[in-house]
C-alpha cells in the first residue's frame, strides 16, 4: 500500500488526533482543505496557531479571557450577589446562551474524580471562598453536571461553603424540555418527581 | 447573550466552515484545542497552513504530488498497460488501500454533471487520450463511482475511448462484502444479479 504525499499524511495524522475525528473523517477534512480557498485555509491555520497564546484565564472567575478579567467579570451590570459555580468555561457559555442568569460565575476547572485523581486541591476552591466573601454573595448556585462526579462535587461544596453564604442551591434535575416521558431513564424520572414544583394558578 | 473571547470565536467560526462540523462540534474542538498541548496545536496549525503550498498535481495522472510526478507514476514496477480511471485522488487512495491493482491511474477531476455545469471539457480527458497512446495501454478500467454522474461519465468515456484501447472495463457493482442481502436496495440487487459470475470448481 502506498501512502499519501508527506504533507497530506501529516495533516491527516494531526486531524485524527482531534476528539471525535477518526481516520476517515480526517482524510475527508484534509481533502476538503486541499480543495478549499487559500484564504479560508490560512484563516483556519492561523486561528489554531493563535488560540493558545491569545487566550488566558480570567483572574477572578477562571473563565477564558483575553485580558485580566473576562467580559462577564468586567460587566458592571451583572448581579454580584449571586454566584453560579460551573465545572468548565464551556458550561458557563451554555448557561449564558440560555440567557436566564444575570449574576457572576466561578469556574472550578473540573469536578472531583477519584478515578482521574482530581481532589479538592485541583479545583479553584480557595479562590471561590475568597470571592464569596469579597463580593458579599447571598446565593451560590451549584451548576456542576448531573453526573456522579458533578453531584459529588456539588455535595462537597455544599459542606465547604455552609456558613459562608446564606443560600446554596442546585440547578433543577428533571425531564428536558421537549423530551418524551416515555423515553426518560428511571433516575431522571425519579429526580423529576422528587423535585416537583407547585403549579401556580 | 455574551459571545466568546474574540480569538476563540474566530476559531469556532473557522472550524464550523469544515464539512460535517456544525457549531456544536466546532465549539467542542475549539475547547479541546484550548486545553491541548501547545506542540500538538502548533503541529495542526502548521500542517493546515502548509498543505496548499506544498501539494500540487502529478503532471501525468493528476493525483496529488509534492514533485512533478506522484509516487505511483514514479514507480517503475507499476504495470503501465492497465490504466484505472477515477474521479478524485481520494478514490485513487481508496483503491490503493485495497491493494489489488498494480497498474497506473488517471484522475479525471470529477464526473460529468449537468447540474453542476461540469462537461467533458472540465475533466482531464485530452491528457487521458494522450497517455493511453503513449503508454500503449491494453486495458482501461472505468472506476468512477456507481452514481448517476459516475455511470454517465463511464458511459461517455466508453464511447470516447473506443478504438483507442483494446479492453474497456467497468468495476463490478453488487453487494458489499459482509453486507446483508436483506438490507440491500433494489438497484444494487438488480446489478448484483445482472453481473453474476460463474463459480469455479
Image (cartoon, coloured by chain):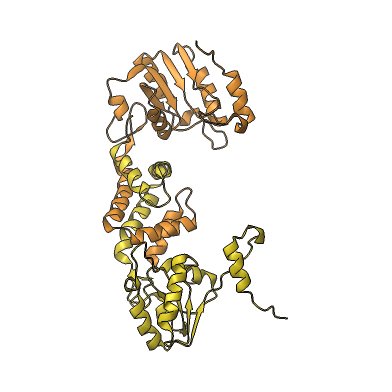
Chain colours: A yellow, B orange
Residue B61 placement: quadrant: top left
Q: How many numbered badges does the structure rendering display?
A: 0
Residue occupying image coordinates x 34% and y 71% = A57
Q: Residue furthest right?
A: A201
Give coordinates of residue B3: x percent, y percent. 45, 69
Q: Is residue A175 visible?
A: no
Give coordinates of residue A69: x percent, y percent. 35, 77
B166 relative to A98 in the view: left or right: left
B160 relative to A198 in the view: left or right: left
Give coordinates of residue A153: x percent, y percent. 43, 72
Q: Nearer the viewer, residue A183 or B149?
A: A183
Residue occupying image coordinates x 37% and y 62% = A115
Residue B102 placement: quadrant: top left
Q: Nearer the viewer, residue A80 or A148?
A: A148
As drawn, B47 above or below A48: above
As drawn, B183 above or below A113: above
Residue occupying image coordinates x 54% and y 70% = A98
Give coordinates of residue B18: x percent, y percent. 44, 50
Q: Nearer the viewer, residue B102 or A82?
A: A82
Q: Nearer the viewer, residue A54 or B31?
A: B31
A129 relative to B195 in the view: left or right: left
Q: Which quadrant does the C terminus of chain A fall into? A: bottom right
Q: Which quadrant does the N terminus of chain A fall into? A: top left
Residue A114 placement: quadrant: bottom left
Residue occupying image coordinates x 39% and y 22% = B101
Q: Is residue A23 visible?
A: yes
Amino acid at each position: 500500500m502506498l501512502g499519501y504525499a508527506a504533507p497530506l499524511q501529516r495533516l491527516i495524522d494531526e486531524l485524527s488526533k482531534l476528539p471525535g475525528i477518526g481516520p476517515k473523517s480526517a482524510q475527508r477534512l484534509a481533502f476538503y482543505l486541499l480543495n478549499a480557498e487559500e484564504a479560508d485555509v490560512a484563516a483556519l491555520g492561523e486561528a489554531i496557531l493563535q488560540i493558545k497564546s491569545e487566550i488566558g484565564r480570567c483572574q477572578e472567575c477562571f473563565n477564558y479571557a483575553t485580558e485580566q478579567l473576562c467580559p462577564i467579570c468586567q460587566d458592571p451590570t451583572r448581579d454580584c450577589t449571586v454566584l453560579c459555580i460551573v465545572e468548565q468555561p464551556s458550561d458557563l457559555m451554555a448557561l449564558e446562551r440560555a440567557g436566564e442568569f444575570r449574576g457572576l460565575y466561578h469556574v472550578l476547572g473540573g469536578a472531583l474524580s477519584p478515578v482521574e485523581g482530581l481532589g479538592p486541591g485541583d479545583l479553584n476552591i480557595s479562590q471561590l471562598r475568597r470571592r464569596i466573601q469579597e463580593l458579599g454573595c447571598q446565593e451560590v448556585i451549584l451548576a456542576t453536571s448531573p453526573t456522579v462526579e458533578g453531584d459529588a462535587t456539588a455535595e462537597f461544596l455544599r459542606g465547604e461553603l455552609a456558613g459562608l453564604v446564606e443560600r446554596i442551591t442546585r440547578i433543577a434535575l428533571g425531564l428536558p424540555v421537549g423530551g418524551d416521558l416515555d423515553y426518560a431513564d428511571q433516575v431522571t424520572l425519579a429526580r423529576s418527581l422528587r423535585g416537583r414544583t407547585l403549579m401556580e394558578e
